[in-house]
């Protein structure tokens, strides 16, 4: 059912100008004043003589504002200094038209973006663009001129009924619905009137709710003015992004700048930064609102281009990747704490509980939102999540061609922990991940110790991927990882430690053209520490300190370069080709004659065998 208009009648000529203006003021009085005014100065056109006049702040509800698409011969700010010449320009017809409508309604001033912003001043341009949502919100009426909407014969001057209400079929081809800047110009004003190319009035926003919703996919509550700017912020960020999915701008940076008002944000304008402007917008959204639905984008075309093996950063590259997010809604669960998201030089960081589907090597990030079109299981809304892949630099997004929409009961959550996700992913790293060139170093434990509990820990912890049972090395020859096994004894409550140091080393150090890597591992027990030259100056706590562990890597590489002669017998693990170490661990009784045994103090020893599982 079409929403009932709250706005003044379509043909205000039937009422007195005073009554019409009073009706507008009563309507606007229902809006919170704090959301309608701002302290920024603005230029307005005097509708009697077309002179520009400066105001210290937007005069609340006392001016008309124009929304249109730019064309040839637009009148700029500097052109208004010579009105005689400005009147000859093609774009002056728009200025004349909006001023005519303003005078007919009893308003003395109007605002047109082409001539009311001094674009030669970067400071004024930045201030104006950051103020624009408020200026459109503060206007008494927004005049939306659809220059490619055909109208009937005659002039009209804005006071006639034109050809009646425009239909969806007539409105849909209009260029006005494809431009980025006109999105906020439709949402921000309380009252919008649509005019055709002959300046015939074809309907108000309130009267055209149904066709406008069908064309733009914007929520009807947002279109009909029921939502003030504060409640607009309660709409999921992904859904608001979807409204801009099919819109374009002349400058690539404006794809971000035209959305600032929709998200209640202010940003410095940096023309020349290119697509990074859209990344900055997303950074500000997560930093100020914590709305994780902004990560709910997906690009179905990547499934065809990359066979579904795509790797991407956390942020979308373009609003079009939110096209399918029109039914995304945030979930307010009082049990789950709101994330405190930090944007750092290393990535996007926050504390959360990653999840999995109980099978596979997947990491899933719960986005605290749902898809209203997804079927409900057990009477509960499904949750929206995205797949992550762990790398040495942090998590990246994988399977970005799709979202994971799943019943929450199907997920197994890990303990809450800090995570870091890369906001973007460069081409070389993405290609290396797709080709498997990130060199994950797998470690598989095969423990045969009935009735004996052997503990395992991995260092550095931020490089250990529990799902894949591997260290994420980044393919860097300086990598060193540590597997610590805690072996129980008969004489102490504390287990005896055994450490396996796993490293990547260059296969042929004498050949500068050969940078191929191989795995080398060494096993050290508490008793054997003193027999390895240089190791005695390291304390046990140093093994768990990333900086000291890196220094240990230098020590072991010196031993490796010397042919491992400085290591005790049987302490070097033969890894073979490939990038995986399989540790087959068994408890051996005291007195065993197995040569591969490395004895710990007490009655138990540990046997470690290593073989490659990758070729």
Image: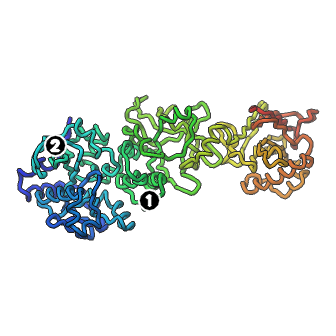
Residue 27, compared with residue 518, is above or below; it is below
Classify 330 as above or below 402.
Answer: below
Residue 42, image quadrant: bottom left
Mark number, residue 151: 2
> Is residue 254 left or right of 344 when viewed as pictured?
left
On screen, residue 121 versus residue 156, left or right, reads right
* Residue 511 place in picture, x, y as percent: 83, 47
Of residues 176 and 600, the one drawn nearer to the viewer in this rendering: 176
Horizontal and vertical percent position of residue 82 = 23, 69
Q: Is residue 443 toward the left or the right of residue 88 in the image?
A: right
Q: Is residue 493 visible?
A: no
* Tag 1 secondary structure: loop
For disc 1, the marked residue is 271
Asked if residue 409 can be seen in this view, the reply is yes
Q: Residue at x 80, y 41 (%)?
A: 487
Quadrant of the frame with the N terminus: top left
Q: Which mark is residue 361?
A: none
Q: Residue at x 63, y 44 (%)?
A: 391
**In front of the other: 382 or 581:** 581
Circle 2 or circle 1, nearest the eye: 2
Query: Mark 2 and mark 1: span between their CA atoms?
Result: 38 Å
């Amino acid at each position: 059912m079409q929403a009932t208009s709250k706005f003044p009648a379509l043909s205000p000529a039937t009422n007195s100008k005073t009554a019409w203006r009073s009706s507008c003021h009563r309507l606007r009085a229902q809006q919170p004043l704090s959301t309608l005014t701002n302290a920024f100065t603005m230029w307005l056109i005097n509708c009697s003589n077309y002179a520009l006049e400066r105001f210290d702040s937007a005069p609340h509800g006392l001016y008309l504002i124009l929304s249109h698409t730019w064309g040839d011969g637009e009148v700029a700010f500097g052109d208004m200094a010579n009105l005689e010449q400005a009147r000859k320009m093609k774009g002056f017809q728009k200025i004349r038209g909006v001023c005519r409508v303003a005078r007919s309604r009893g308003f003395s001033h109007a605002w047109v973006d082409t001539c009311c912003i001094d674009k030669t001043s970067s400071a004024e341009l930045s201030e104006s663009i950051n103020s624009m949502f408020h200026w459109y919100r503060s206007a008494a009426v927004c005049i939306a001129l659809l220059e490619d909407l055909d109208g009937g014969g005659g002039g009209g001057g804005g006071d006639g009924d034109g050809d009646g209400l425009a239909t969806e079929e007539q409105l849909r081809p209009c260029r006005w619905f494809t431009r980025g800047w006109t999105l906020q110009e439709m949402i921000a004003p309380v009252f919008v009137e649509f005019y055709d190319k002959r300046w015939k009035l074809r309907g108000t926003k309130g009267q055209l709710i149904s066709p406008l919703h069908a064309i733009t996919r914007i929520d009807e509550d947002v279109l009909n003015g029921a939502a003030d700017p504060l409640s607009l912020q309660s709409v999921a960020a992904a859904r608001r992004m979807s409204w801009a999915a099919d819109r374009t701008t002349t400058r690539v940076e404006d794809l971000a700048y035209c959305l600032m008002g929709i998200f209640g944000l202010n940003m410095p304008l940096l023309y020349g930064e290119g697509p990074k402007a859209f990344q900055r917008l997303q950074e500000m959204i997560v930093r100020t609102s914590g709305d994780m639905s902004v990560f709910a984008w997906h690009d179905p075309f990547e499934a065809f281009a990359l066979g579904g093996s795509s790797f991407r950063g956390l942020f979308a590259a373009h609003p079009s990747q939110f096209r399918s997010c029109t039914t995304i809604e945030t979930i307010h669960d009082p049990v789950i704490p709101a994330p405190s998201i930090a944007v750092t030089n290393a990535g996007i960081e926050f504390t959360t509980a990653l999840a999995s589907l109980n099978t596979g090597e997947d990491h899933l990030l719960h986005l605290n939102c749902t898809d209203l079109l997804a079927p409900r299981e057990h009477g509960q809304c499904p949750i929206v999540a995205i797949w992550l892949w762990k790398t040495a630099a942090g998590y990246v997004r994988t399977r970005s061609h799709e979202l994971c929409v799943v019943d929450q009961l199907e997920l197994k959550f890990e303990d809450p922990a800090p995570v870091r996700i890369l906001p973007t992913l460069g081409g070389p790293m993405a290609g290396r991940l797709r080709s498997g060139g990130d060199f994950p170093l797998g470690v598989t434990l095969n423990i045969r110790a009935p009735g004996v509990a052997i503990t395992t820990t991995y260092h550095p912890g931020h490089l250990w991927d529990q799902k894949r049972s591997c260290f994420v090395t980044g393919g860097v020859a300086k990598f060193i990882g540590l597997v610590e096994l805690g072996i129980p004894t008969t004489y102490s409550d504390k287990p005896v430690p055994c450490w396996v140091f796993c490293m990547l080393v260059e296969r042929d150090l004498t050949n500068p053209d050969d940078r191929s890597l191989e795995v080398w591992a060494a096993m050290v027990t508490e008793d054997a520490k003193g027999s390895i030259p240089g190791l005695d100056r390291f304390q046990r706590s140093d093994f768990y300190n990333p900086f000291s562990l890196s220094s240990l890597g230098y020590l072991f590489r010196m031993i490796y370069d010397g042919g491992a002669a400085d290591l005790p017998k049987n302490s070097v693990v033969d890894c073979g080709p490939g990038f995986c170490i399989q540790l087959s661990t068994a408890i051996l009784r005291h007195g065993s004659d197995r040569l591969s045994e490395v004895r710990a103090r007490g009655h138990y020893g540990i046997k470690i065998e290593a073989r490659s599982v990758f070729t």
